Image (spheres, grey):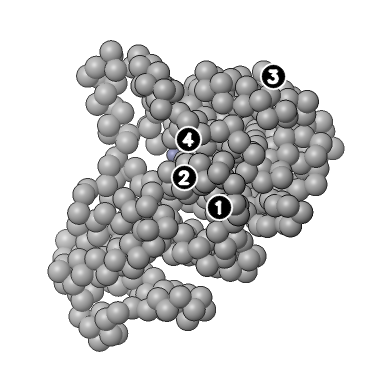
Amino acid sequence: MLAKHILSSAIFITLLSIFLANNVASASNSGLGLGVNAGEAENKQARNTKSGSITLAQNSAAKGLRHADIFPGFAKLCDIETPLRDMSVKHLKSAHSNVKRLKPSRTNSFRKKQTLGPMQVFNNLYFVGAGNVSSWAIDTGESIVLIDALNNEVQAQKYIIDGLKALGLDNKPISHLIITHGHGDHYGGQSLISRLYQLQIIMSSKEWKWLAAGAGGFSSARWGQAPVFEKNTAKDEKPGGTLGVNDASTIRVGDNTFTFYVTPGHTPGTLSVMFNVINKGNTHKAILWGGTGLNYGADASRIKTYTESAARMRQLALAENIDVFLSNHPKMDGSDKKLAALKKGGPNPFIVGNDTVEAAFDMLYHCTTAQYIKASHP
Ligand SMILES: [Zn+2]
C-alpha cells in the first residue's frame, strides 16, 4: 500500500514537472508573462505535501481566472472548491427516481428565453443555434457544412432548417454535419437533417467508438437519436454516410478547408475544427473548441488529457495566427453577447485577435491543471 502510494506520488510529481515545464516554456514563447510564481525549490517542497498541492492548484486557478473577464463562461472550470460533477451518476439517479422529469417542459421554458439568431456572423458563417447550445453553418459556395445538430429534431427544425430558410440559404444542400462530440445536445437533431439531405456525418473515429459503447453512461430524455457509424465514405463516393476522422486530417468542401483536431478532455474523442471565415473580403482563421465542461468527476487521467489538449491548441492558435474563437455553447465563447453586439453594427466582435484566442486556451489550460492537481491529491 505504501509502495503504491510512493509510486503514484512519484508519477504525480513527474507529471506536474512536465506541466510546470510546459507552463514556463509557453509563457516565454507567448509573451504573456505567465510564469510559475513560486520558485523551483518552493515548488519541490510544495509537491510533497497535500497543503502544497492545494497551493499549486490555487495558483493555477488564479492564473486561469485572470482571463475570466474575457471568458466568464470558463470560470466554473477554475472552481476547485466545488467537487466536480459526474453526469453519469446524476443520470442514473434521475432515471430511477422521477419519471415525470422526463417530460419536455424544460424545452418549452427554454424556447421562450431564446433570443439569439439565426444570424449572419461572417460572409460565410451563420449562427443557427438555440439559447444555450450552438449550431454553426458554413457556406462553402456549393453547399452548407453544419457544425452540431442541437438537442433534438424539434430544435433542428426550428433553429437550423427554419433558420437557414430565414437567412436565404435553403437553396443550398447541407452536405456535411460535423458533430463535435458524442453528447446529445450536439447530435440530437441529426436524424431530421439526415432525412432531409444526403449528408455525411463526421465525428472523430475515437468518438464514434465511444458513442457506440454508451458514451460514458451519460444521456438525457431531451436528446434525440444518436447517429450510428456505418463505414467511412470513400473519397470517390457520393457524399453521404459516415466518416470517422483522425487528428490533423482535413476535408475540402467548396471554397473552404476544415482541419480536425482530436482534443480529448470533455469527452475522449472531442473534435475541434479550424476553418476560414471571411469578413468584408478578408480571410480570418477560426477555431471551434469542441467541448468545455468537466462532467465525469475527479478523474485525474481524463482531466490530464484536457490540459494537454488546451496546451496544444494554444500552440496551434499561435502557429496559425487564429483570431476567431468559437464554441458550441453561446455562453462559453460569449456568442450570446457578440450576436447582440453584431446586431447593433460596428466592428465584428467575433474577430477577437490572436492574443485573446491564446488567452482562451491559456485559461482552459490553467483551470484544468488546477483540477488535475486537485484530483491527483484527493
Ligand atoms: Zn458535452
Q: Which residue is mark 4?
A: 133
CA neighbours of label 3 inside 10 A, class few (<14), some (14 to 19), many (20+): few
Identity, as a three-letter code, of the amino acid under mark 4:
Val
**Quarter the N terminus occupies:** bottom left
CB of mark 3 near ligand 1 (< 8 Å): no
Q: Nearer the viewer, residue 200 or 335?
A: 335
Where disc 2 sits, the SS reads: helix
Q: Residue at x 81, y 42 (%)?
A: 254
Q: Which residue is mark 1?
A: 349
51, above or below 325, in the image: below
Identity, as a three-letter code, of the amino acid under mark 1:
Pro
- Residue contact between numbered discs 2 and 3, judged by CB atoms under 8 Å: no
56 vs 351, left or right, is left
Q: Which residue is mark 3?
A: 196
377 vs 114, left or right, is left
Where disc 3 sits, the SS reads: helix
Q: CA distance from mark 1 to mark 3?
A: 33 Å
Q: Which residue is mark 2?
A: 337
Which quarter holds ligand 1? top left
Q: CA distance from mark 2 to mark 3?
A: 32 Å
Q: Position of residue 81 (x, y in %)?
A: 20, 54
